[in-house]
Every structure is written in structure tokens, then in C-alpha cells.
């Protein structure tokens, strides 16, 4: 089922219109924070959830308003796809994303899910994407190019896993070197250098070590729940026309991000490669969906960052 997720989340225009009409006339009670749909439930709330699941082709048949095993499994498949806790219970958070997907307001394939502590890559990497520029600290995968790849190639070379040219291009040889390193420390060899592989490389003894494991290297490093791809811009309290306080009343400073609370609730802790840890404390009219603003102390730093597509790590509570 999961191998088909990418196809599932591209409903046709007719399907979107159909879902919009059905949901408009559905009297769901999900504005109530305590409302949930679980195995054995029945009624309009269940029917509304089923309509959304059918729209994503995760559930077949008609919306009968009865939450049976097939509906629970469809909820689990959806939760797995977006990186939510997989319990088969459709609570407010699950429903918000499910409804947004049914309306076509979000593209679920933007959710780059990695399961901690052993990452599982649900969506395949598009090797034809041209814009794969990677800064130091970015997630490095096949097709990545730039100083981030140079940094990884040098680290792998020093550790004895890479003997090719340090050319800043993550090709087959670099991917294999990452896999070999991951395998040597009993880590899932997926060939992707993310936050956990970085941590292991930073702490791995040069020349290897028979008793060294990646779990040891990760002690004290931020633990994360999932990875999300976002379009990031930068701002600063020194920027003309901007105030010094966030929407939540705190001071704008390095370590703060502005988010759409619908996608990233206030108070969420994130890790941004090349920047560090940050907390969601601000928002703005232009911050919608997978858009964030990253705060810097000076206007010059904000200008240097500019605007770019990055992957951020949602940290554990």
C-alpha cells in the first residue's frame, strides 16, 4: 500500500469538486478538540472521514458511516504517509490534514517522512530534479550538489569509506560510501546522510572502531519525529518596517521561526541544518502551508540567507 502513496495523493479536479460538495453538506463535529473517530464508531463524523479517505483512494466502496477494520486501516495508511502517530484513530490533527488533502489544499508528497530511529523512505527520490543545491548540513542524497556534498565526501574520505574525487556531486560512489558507513555502525543503510548520519560521522573514531555504534554517537543529539520540506525565507528585527515582537509576544531573535500554525503549531521545536534549533513562535499573512520565516539577529544575515527550499526536522517533545 505505501508504495502507492505518491499516486494516491493527486486527486482529479472532478474528485475535488465531489468531495467539496459532500463535505459541505456533512455535519462533522471536528471543531471540537475532543472529537475522534475510532473502531466501532458510526454516524456523520465517520462518513465525513470516509469521504476524505475515498478521495485519496485509500478506502474503497461507499461512505457508510461505520468505522470498521477497513476504515481503521485506511486511517493508519494516511497517518503513516504524513508522519503522524499511527494509531488508526482519526482525531483533530489527523482530520485537519486529511480534509486539506481531500480539498487539494496541500500536497502530501511534500511530507518527507523519516521514522526515528531507523529512517524509512516512503517516497522515492526523483533523480531528475535539477535544483539539488546542498549547503553544509543539508540532507545529502543521490543527485545533491554543492558544498554540503564536498563536506560529506571529505568526512567519508577521512573515515576510510570514500576514495573517489571530492567533486561536490553525490553520485553512486558517494551514495555507496554513505551506505557502507551506515552499515559499519549497524545503522539502516539507506544512502541518505541526514541528521542521524551526521551525528554518527561527527563522533565516529577515525579509522573505524569495532565496538562503535550509531546509537552511541547519537547520545545527547536532538531526537526528531519527522522531516518536512519547506520554503524558507529570513527576517530580522533590524529589517525596516518590522517590529521586535513575534505574534506570540516574544522577542524576535535567532532561534525563532514564523510558521503557519495549521501545519506547525506554536511551541514546536525544530532543527534546521546549518542554523540549529528553533521554536515556532511567530506567524504572518504570507506564511501559509509549507512556508516558514527564519529569524536572524541582523538584517545582513537575513539577506545572506535569502529564500531557499530546505528540509527541517520536527523534534520530539
Image: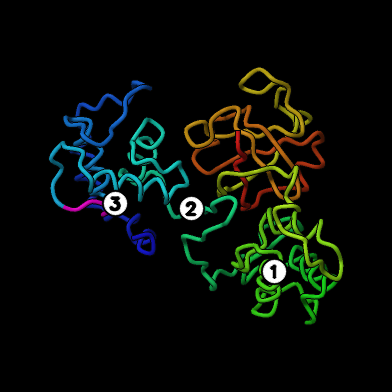
Horizontal side, residue 105 vs residue 175: left or right: left
Separation of marks 3 and 1 at Cα, in angstroms: 34 Å
**Residue at the farthest top position:** 249
Classify residue 167 by image quadrant. Answer: bottom right
Which stretch did the figure color magenta?
56-60
Q: Residue at x 70, y 42 (%)?
A: 222
Q: Residue at x 47, y 46 (%)?
A: 83
Instruction: Specify the label residue 176 is tagged with.
Output: none
Residue 57 shown in magenta: yes
Element at label 2? helix
Q: Magenta stretch: dominant SS?
A: loop
Separation of marks 3 and 2 at Cα, in angstroms: 15 Å
In the rendering, at what x and y percent does residue 112 appear?
52, 54
**Residue at the farthest front position:** 211
Instruction: Specify the label residue 145 is tagged with.
Output: 1
Quick one: quadrant of the N terminus?
bottom left
Query: Is residue 193 positioned above or below 98 on the image?
Result: below
Query: Is residue 275 positioned above or below 175 on the image?
Result: above
Separation of marks 1 and 2 at Cα, in angstroms: 20 Å
Amino acid at each position: 500500500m505505501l508504495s502507492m502513496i505518491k499516486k494516491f495523493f493527486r486527486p482529479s479536479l472532478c474528485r475535488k469538486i465531489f468531495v467539496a460538495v459532500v463535505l459541505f453538506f456533512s455535519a462533522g463535529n471536528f471543531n471540537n478538540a475532543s472529537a475522534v473517530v475510532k473502531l466501532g464508531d458510526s454516524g456523520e463524523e465517520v462518513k465525513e472521514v470516509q469521504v476524505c479517505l475515498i478521495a485519496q483512494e485509500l478506502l474503497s466502496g461507499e461512505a457508510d458511516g461505520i468505522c470498521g477494520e477497513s476504515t481503521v486501516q485506511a486511517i493508519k495508511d494516511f497517518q503513516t504517509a504524513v508522519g503522524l502517530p499511527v494509531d488508526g484513530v482519526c482525531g483533530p490533527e489527523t482530520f485537519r490534514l486529511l480534509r486539506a488533502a481531500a480539498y487539494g489544499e496541500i500536497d502530501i508528497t511534500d511530507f518527507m517522512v523519516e521514522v526515528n530511529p531507523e529512517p524509512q523512505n516512503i517516497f522515492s527520490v526523483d533523480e531528475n530534479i535539477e535544483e539539488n543545491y546542498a549547503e553544509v548540513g543539508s540532507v545529502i542524497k543521490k543527485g545533491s550538489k554543492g558544498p554540503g556534498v564536498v563536506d560529506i565526501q571529505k568526512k567519508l574520505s577521512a573515515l576510510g569509506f570514500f576514495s573517489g574525487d571530492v567533486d561536490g556531486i553525490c553520485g553512486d560512489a558517494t551514495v555507496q560510501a554513505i551506505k557502507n558507513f551506515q552499515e559499519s555502525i549497524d545503522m539502516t543503510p539507506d544512502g541518505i546522510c541526514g541528521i542521524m548520519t551526521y551525528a554518527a560521522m561527527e563522533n565516529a573514531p577515525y579509522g573505524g572502531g569495532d565496538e562503535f555504534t550509531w546509537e552511541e554517537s547519537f547520545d545527547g543529539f536532538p531526537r526528531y519525529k519527522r522531516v518536512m520540506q519547506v520554503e524558507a525565507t529570513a527576517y530580522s528585527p533590524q529589517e525596516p518596517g518590522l517590529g521586535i515582537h513575534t505574534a506570540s509576544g516574544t522577542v524576535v531573535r535567532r532561534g525563532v521561526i514564523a510558521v503557519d500554525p495549521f501545519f506547525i503549531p506554536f511551541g514546536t521545536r525544530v532543527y534546521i541544518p546549518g542554523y540549529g534549533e528553533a521554536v515556532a513562535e511567530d506567524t504572518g499573512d504570507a506564511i501559509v502551508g509549507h512556508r516558514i520565516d527564519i529569524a536572524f539577529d541582523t538584517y545582513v544575515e537575513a539577506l545572506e540567507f535569502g529564500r531557499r527550499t530546505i528540509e527541517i526536522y520536527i523534534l520530539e517533545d
